[in-house]
Amino acid sequence: MSDPSIEIRCRVNGEDVELSGHPMTRLLDALRRQLHLTGTKEGCGEGECGACSVMLDGRLVNSCLVPLVHAEGAAIMTIEGVADGERLHAVQQAFIEYGAAQCGICTPGMVLAAVDLLQRSPHPTEADIRAGLSGNLCRCTGYMRIFEAVVAACVAAPGRPGSSDTGARQ
Amino acid sequence: MFIGQPIPRREARAKVTGHARYLDDLSMPGMLHGVTVRSPVSRGILRDIQYSPDIPWDEFTVVTAADIPGRNVVALIEDDQPCLADGRVNHAEEPILLLAHRDPSWLEEARRGISFEIDPLPPVYSIEDALSGREIVWGADNIFKTYLVTRGDVDAAFEEPDAIVIEGDYETGAQEQLYIEPNAMLALARGDDGITVWGSMQCPYYVHKALMTLFDLPGEKIRIVQMETGGGFGGKEEYPSIIAGHAALLSWKSGRPVKLVYDRAEDMAATTKRHPSQTHHRTAVSRDGRLLAVDIDFVIDGGAYATLSPVVLSRGTIHAAGPYFCPNVRVQGRAVATSVPPHGAFRGFGAPQSLFALERHMDRVAAAVGLAPDELRRRNFIETGQTSAVGQVMHDPIDMAALLDRALELAGYREKRARFDAANRASAVKRGIGLAAFMHGAGFTGSGEDHLASIVTVEATRDGRVRVLTSSTEIGQGTNTVFAQIAADALDVGIDQIEVVQPDTSVVPNSGPTVASRTCMVVGRLVESAALTLLATLKGAALQATDFAGACREYTDRFGPLRGSAQYQAPPGLRWDDERYQGDAYGTYGWAVYVAEVSVDTLTCEIRVDDFVAVQEVGRVINPVLAKGQIEGGVAQGIGWALFEQVAWREGRMANAQMTNYIIPTSMDLPPIRVVFEERPYAYGPGGAKGIGELPMDGPAPAIANAVAHATGADVARIPIIPESLMQLLERAVV
């Protein structure tokens, strides 16, 4: 087996890294296996469920559909890069308080989708929230707790990291 | 007090930061990756296995049925299902051979390098064909199990001159659980040291039992550890025993750790789904809308092996007559064998199927006697002290009429019904509103909990930290948090002092499977009892519990380990007759009335659910945020089952085994779900709680079907109501 292998450089969660493999290696696998960033999950492998969502150059993407060769020079943020050290992002804090995470397998992708939504639209309407999260499937919650969490997160700290002691619960 | 408070989920921080560890996040030195090679045909005699000469087979671990050290069965209820097919196959996707290699990228090519020579036998693909007996695929008659529930004199009641008789046929389709984490196991088998399996599962002791049989090993040589589990919904009740067995066989043969992770297509095509069902209703009702007799024939398709079908059938049969009183009842339930992959546990466990038929039928009965759907139900609700179809005297207070009133008021039911009726005539978009009334028995059926005889242990360390030991798994529903709340209140300590231990069969006692809405009510009650036993031990040693940590220290120093255990004991007076299928089917029931509002575009035949009201009585609510999440999630799955989720079968195989064309609800597809709890403490639940997990699966489908019928006049009798099927109905409907 003599697969052609490439090496690329990119930034992941603010650190310069090198990744290697076949050009068509899924970014999802490179993140999980080479960098051990296992917070990015595989739910379907075909870009439907959003469990593998990461931010790539400021855009929310399904990392199962991104070939390694496309990550050359990119700035990538995974779920592990959302909190500021021990300080959770306002979205993460709201997910905890409003019961938006159940089994948790869609949660990393859902959190990233919500962070992305609030960056693009700091005061989203309900329709904005529904549309903004529509690429991320959840089988546990029926989405209602997630909608509430997103609303609370934009009240707590619109579009930027919040404090971990936010008293957003009503 | 922690019970009743919205305590945040205990493992939530790990989940929102990506640090929670699921099985696929584990890796071990020298680990191999496994795959399963499956039958491409439904039924036949396996003559030969051919290995392509293009693959370096000496680099692979290859396992067939011949490598199984113990008995080649998946130990559950019947021993009819092999762990690996040997000599014959009974359904497509049946596992025949296993492969492992250190590099997962080589496995797919190797899998394609295996071919099977199978002499085909005629398959059976439908309930009708199974019942016809033309081809026998299981036992003597293709029937896994039959139940007959009888009460009163049904035949005589149908002859009463006043009786109006209404008949109907109803069908429900298969449904994929579609937990977002696919099934996954990692096994390490080390000769005399025994076998350890880590995995995604609901029931560690089911896996434990299955591996003891498969390897012919004593219990202490098998260790099963549940990892964080990304959803189950029943789909990780029985099938994980097979996957754990496969991973362990590969590890046994290779001497290396082996990880076996399904991809989405394999998980959807090969593992269990909700049983498809067909139900015939024949009802005699008086002119003023009193039920005189109901005669129900309920049939479910179990697939190729018995698995849990007899138990699913049992629950479906017992729930078939619903929350109504009727003096004359006959319910025949049958689970039949076909040549498709076995159907299995899925939230609701047979009850959603039989309740769909009943609650859709009740609207047709109402129409036949000229009553509003709510009024017909109101006249027939079972009340406190009355006797159910299976002969259970309902001692606990029931007030279905109050739930109905609350639901109708919240939904604006009567006003909307009238308004939609008037507006629909002039509109291509027709609106409708429908309801369903139902109940769900909590815990195992009949004597099931007595047989399980679950055990829970609570122990305290010298510094006053408390460990709750159960085999109940956290699969998203809130086990960790609810058990911590219950234990903290029982011991009167802070919730941060409580650790709910991750299930590991080498550490936790067998508190039964995580199924049947039993975790909070049955196992949670044992947590409460075990904690109180521990407190009593402290008091017995003359140590006051006012300073819990001090008392723990003193007890431990003087007497050694401090622990309390509790074993299940049935609430007083419960009786169940397995032979006659009569008696107290469940310790208690959750009760509910759900209302759905829909709009139907009669040009495109698309259906939207615009509003949903869910009113239920589930005893005391332990954690209002988690409980709401359970109801909302169940309603969402019910909406999917009613409108979107169609398994497309082709030659006994799932043709749409991918998320692209098996459609579950997205954030764009769901209405606001308005959840109301009427709290009525149950004497034998922890803090007064009843089971909750499955109830919300029962109501949405019939409420939506009734709403679509109201909107369009279409006589909906089958779900899912996809646009293509609605179009056919509309062509026949009188609007």
Image (cartoon, coloured by chain):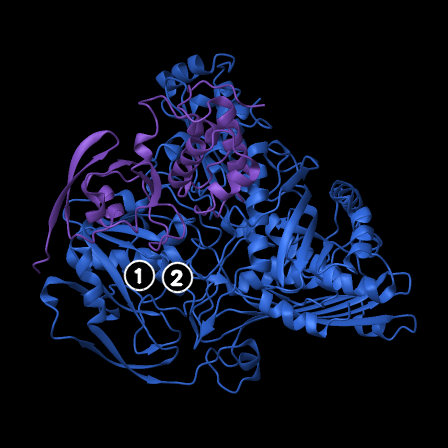
Q: What chain letter is assigned to the residue under label 1? A: B
Q: Residue at x 56, y 50 (%)?
A: B669
Which chain does blue denote in the image?
Answer: B
Mark 1 and mark 2: Cα distance apart in space: 8 Å
Q: Position of residue B114 (x, y in %)?
A: 21, 73
**What kind of element bears circle 1?**
helix
Q: Amino acid at mark 2?
A: Ala
- The residue carrying pointer 2 sits among few (fewer than 14), some (14 to 19) or many (20 or more) residues within 10 Å by Cα, namely many
- State which quarter of the image contains the N terminus of chain B: top right
The dot on residue B214 is 1
Nearest the viewer among B690 and B713 is: B713
Q: Residue at x 59, y 52 (%)?
A: B697
- The residue carrying pointer 1 sits among few (fewer than 14), some (14 to 19) or many (20 or more) residues within 10 Å by Cα, namely many
Would residue B18 be found to the left or right of residue B413 on screen? left
Q: Quadrant of residue B317?
A: bottom right
The colour applied to the residues of chain A in this rendering is purple
Q: Can residue B453 be seen in the rendering of this structure?
A: yes
Provide the residue designation for mark 2: B75
Q: Are the two marked residues, 1 and 2, in contact with CB atoms closer than 8 angstroms?
A: yes
Would residue B691 be found to the left or right of residue A18 on screen? right
Q: Position of residue A89 (x, y in %)?
A: 40, 26
Q: Amino acid at mark 1?
A: Leu
Q: Are marks 1 and 2 on the same chain?
A: yes
Q: Residue at x 38, y 21 (%)?
A: B559
The dot on residue A151 is none
